[in-house]
Image: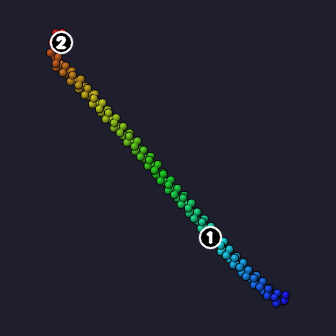
Amino acid sequence: MSIEVIEKRQDRIEDAIERLTDISADLNKMLAVQDQRLLQQEKEISIVLKTIEERRKEWDDKLDGVYNTMRSEDHQILNKLDELKNEQKSQHDKILQKVNDMQKIIWMYMGGFSVIVFLLTNGAKILALLSSVN
């Protein structure tokens, strides 16, 4: 082989090495860009996950607030119902007492009326009986 052929081959090899070096540099740049993209995506995913967790906590807090409000209102309603029940019982007892008092008065009037009717119908006999005893 001649020197020219060897030089040609050597030039070709050097060109190939240069191309491979360029390709390697380009690949390194592409890998660096991809690494940056991956890091950026990981940061964005981390931010999104953090936001989701914050929203979940806010939702839980609001839900707890709603449940506490419901419980509080339930207790207030139950207390009001107890108050109404006690008030109705008190009113019922007062009315029952008034009815019982009225019944006593009616029975007393009926007893008094019965005595008056008895005395009026049998008054002459009673006076005759009393006058004969004296």
Numbered disc in front, either 2 or 1: 1
Amino acid at dot 2: Leu
State the residue in front, 37 or 100. Answer: 37
Above or below, 113 against 92 in this view is above
Above or below, 99 against 121 in this view is below
Q: Secondary structure at mark 1?
A: helix
Q: Residue at x 44, y 47 (%)?
A: 74
State the residue in front, 108 or 54. Answer: 54
Query: Callout 2 environment at 10 Å: few (<14), some (14 to 19), or many (20+)?
Result: few
State the residue in front, 105 or 50. Answer: 50
Residue named by callout 1: 40
Q: Position of residue 110 (x, y in %)?
A: 23, 25
State the residue in front, 59 or 69. Answer: 59
Q: Position of residue 44 (x, y in %)?
A: 59, 67
Residue named by callout 2: 130
Q: Residue at x 40, y 41 (%)?
A: 82
**Colour convention:** rainbow
Q: Secondary structure at mark 2?
A: helix
| Label 2, label 1: how far apart the Cα atoms are | 127 Å
